Amino acid sequence: MHFISNLTNILATQVQQLGFFKKVVTIIKDYYPNILEGIANTLLIALIGTVIGLLIGVLTGLIRTIPLSKNPVVKCIQKIVNVIISIYVEIFRGTPMMVQSMVIFWGFAGLTGGNTLPVIPAGIIIVSINTGAYMAEIVRGGIISIDKGQFEGAHSLGMNHAQTMFNVIIPQMFRNILPSVSNEFVINVKDTSVLNVIGVYELYKIGDIIIKGNFWMFETYLVICVIYFILTFTITRILRLIEKKLAGNENYVICGSQSNPDAEIKVGGTN
């Protein structure tokens, strides 16, 4: 009897497992067009939002690093702008994106008499503004990380602040902050899930719609979870390869080195 009981439990478990995998296959088979739509919207919003957020971060970073003018009026304007930027950064870094989504989406509707933004542009705007607040600090930290001697060297060559930033500092800054920018993009891929509160058909929202049609909550969310993992894992590996390419070779020899014969410059076949 004990053997029969164990055999029955094993068979029941196998049937349940077959039912589970059948449900997973059915979800992918029946809803793959919707899932692909969710993936496309998720990547679109995350990518554009990250790029615009980076531009916002670069702009605010440049403004905050401009030396204060000796002109009292210009100096006062600079301080006011810096205060506004600081408030923007603190508010959007200190509040959840879900709450920001509701405030921006329905706030726009309140100001326009009930007219709401299309959900995809609204999602891009929300992610861009939120990302810009984080990028502002990332860019500022990247600029500060550049050795002050390079600022002084550029100024000694007659460059003004704008020329110094665009020709000397910003190229190095982008290389320094690339890991942080890549990480922010991966975070945005996951954080777009909060945009379901305003009706954006991103990946999580598609999962919610699938559940309303089949009531398979665990299986559906498991599929969505695996897709999120595949997206973030793939993106992370691609971005790391890009970072390695930009970093260059770890070992190199300065051409013309007098201490290394292999680095001597040869002209016309002779040393």
Image (cartoon, rainbow, N blue to C red):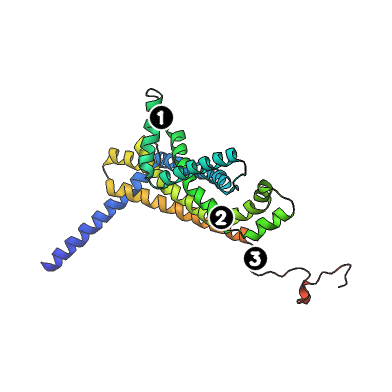
Q: Earlier in the sequence, mark 3 or mark 1?
A: 1
Give the labeled residue for mark 3.
249
Left or right of residue 138: residue 198: left
Can you identify the residue that label 2 sits on? 142
Foreground mark, 3 or 1? Answer: 1
Q: Is residue 44 visible?
A: no
Above or below, 167 against 108 in this view is below
Residue at the spot x=48%, y=43% of the render?
A: 83
The reply to whether callout 3 and callout 1 are in contact (CB within 8 Å) is no
Question: Which sits in the foreground, 19 or 227?
Answer: 227
Q: Amino acid at mark 3?
A: Asn
**Res 123 seen here:** yes
Quadrant containing the N terminus in the rendered view: bottom left
Viewer-proximal residue among 24 and 227:
227
User: Looking at the picture, how far across and down is residue 135, in whole percent?
Assistant: 50, 48
Q: Is residue 111 above or below residue 233?
A: above
Q: Residues within 10 Å of mark 2 (few under 14, many from 20)?
A: many
Q: Secondary structure at mark 1?
A: helix
Please name the residue that numbered disc 1 is placed on.
108
Distance from the alpha carbon under mark 3 to that under mark 2: 22 Å
Q: CA distance from mark 3 to mark 1?
A: 50 Å
Total labels drawn: 3
User: Farthest residue toward the front?
Assistant: 72
Of the pair 70 and 236, the residue shown nearer to us = 70
For the residue labelled by badge 2, is the local secondary structure a helix, a strand or a loop? helix
Identify residue type, mark 1.
Phe
Mark 3 or mark 2: whose residue is earlier in sequence: 2
Q: Viewed as shown, does residue 62 lie left or right of 214?
A: right
Please give the name of the residue rendered at 20% of the width and 57% of the height, measured from the top-left corner.
Answer: 12
Name the residue located 48 percent from the left edge and 54 percent from the top edge: 183
Q: Amino acid at mark 2?
A: Gly
Give the Cα distance between marks 1 and 2: 34 Å
